[in-house]
Amino acid sequence: MQAEQLFVGGTVRTGLPGAQASGALAVAGGRVLALGQDALDSRGPGTDVLDLAGGALLPSFGDGHVHPLIGGLGLRGAPVRQARSVEEILAAVAGWAAAHPGASWVTGDAFDPTLAPGGRFDARWLDSVVAGRPVVLRTMDHHTMWVNSEALRRARFDASTPEPDAGEILRRADGSPLGTLREWGAIGPVLDLLPVPGLNEQTAALAEVSALFAAAGITWVQDAWAEHGQVDAWLAAAAAGSLRFRANLAFRVEPTSWKDQLDELAADRDRVSGGAPGWLTARTVKFFADGVVEAGTAALLQPYDDCPHSHGIANWSPAELADAMTATDALGFQAHVHAIGDAGVRLALDAIAETARRNGPADRRPTVAHVQLIDPADLPRFAALGVIANLEPLWAQPDPLMTELTLPRVGAARGSRQYQIRSLLHSGARVSFGSDWPVTAYQPLPGVATAATRQTPGGHPDSGWLPAERVTAADALAAYSSGVAYQAFEEHEWGLLRPGMRADLVQLAADPAVIPARELRDLPVLGTWLAGTRTC
């Protein structure tokens, strides 16, 4: 068969363990046709020859846990992500509010929760720049919200408001709400008041994000939090041809409503797969086992060091999570569980084990995302239960979030066993990588560099933070490609470069196997192909 495309002039890294690099790759019909000399021999008069210019061709990247629509819509609010102080946030909010006088709400996304002592943000600070309209800002982890007094008033939060289940309203000494809300029980009543973006706005956000992801080498994503009301936007984006990646949607279920969601989940799954075949699936259900350490809401087996009476917040009881997971599993859904604290991880693993006991053997591939803290007794359970550990490698560094909020809360002993990527791999567990964008950057290569060095972008510390958990660049790249493909039940379709596999490719300016790991952070992506079609 004649090649339609032939990549030459560089190094082809197949992603196959122990495989030798190749110097050429041929594509026909959207799939890898041949490698090496066989690829060169497949060249014909109509072959499009692409010069790698001394760079490298690899399997494209996937993102095993990301929020494309949430993040895309967040790009449209006040630009608070780049702020480096409370004053800069206030200036960004004031500027956006002045430029959008017709907006009924002022919103902003992904600000740094370390910019106020203890992560305590005061409504009165926002009141000083916008008082007549409600202001709602969300931290980069999306588990904390900073609001002004008008937003508190509209949500009916005052000194008499009882503490919500699965949430926290931070208060002043007199009991009045401070302006900082944590977790869904407190955040939800405010989110319910926000205007719902229209279909055109949502589809435009997906198109914008799609272009950004393609430029980073990404061709498949796990949307880790989808809602029933977002299905139309995804289908419209696919119909318009504006998607440059394939996606699987994970529908969020709640402890109080999951039983009522079952019929809707199945109907939405069928509508998505039937409405955009080859582009979209919706075979996953998302559970939040707990919160996050920096907000003091991750569920811990032992109390927080800085709050000895608190173990954090478990969003589900063990019995309810097991019941919900068993029911959705019986409908054919894959479980995807947010679990940060060691108690949250155990809660997720116990529910997965109970699901298998009740429903019998099956190829489930349950995924536990983030796994910041794992009790030593639970680490071997990932491999034993067939659980995929999805980690966000950019979190595995001593940045201000880690040094100023996380470590003081969990202490030295627990702090020394965070993000055990190498330990999980060595245990035989499947590992995939993601970004959790807009929590942290969506570009995979900075994540590869961080996983391999355990250093900040500035190279701190010299020996790496918790260096025993460093992995090779090859392992990190695999977690972004074949690891995510396995999570997607598509390991026979993409994630490796061998004849017959889909030609999902990324071109890098240099061979990642021969440059220092820390330099991978800034390695340019020169091209991305999805099934042989260039997307960037």
Image (cartoon, rainbow, N blue to C red):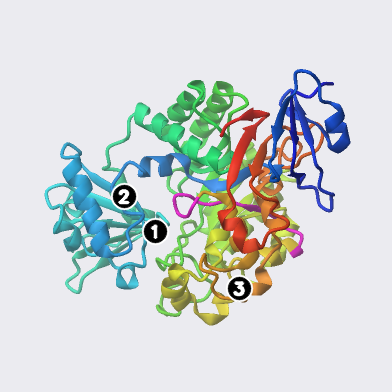
User: Can the viewer see residue 331 in this picture?
Assistant: no
Residue 417 pos. (x, y %): 60, 73
Helix, strand or loop for disc 3: loop
Q: Is residue 55 left or right of residue 465?
A: right
Task: For label 1, count other residues whose C-alpha is less than 10 Å away and answer few (under 14), some (14-19) or many (20+).
Answer: some
Majority SS type along the magenta span? loop
Q: Which residue is mark 2?
A: 79
Residue 193 pos. (x, y %): 26, 43
- Tags 2 and 1 in contact by the CB under 8 Å rule? no
Amino acid of disc 2: Pro
Read off the magenta span. 426-441
Q: Is residue 201 left or right of residue 135?
A: right
Q: Classify residue 25 by image quadrant.
A: top right
Q: Classify residue 49 by image quadrant.
A: top right
Marker count (numbered): 3
> Image height check: is 145 above or below 326?
below
Q: Which residue is mark 3?
A: 464
Q: Which residue is mark 1?
A: 166
Q: Of label 3 and label 1, which has the lower sequence position?
A: 1
Q: Is residue 139 left or right of residue 96?
A: right
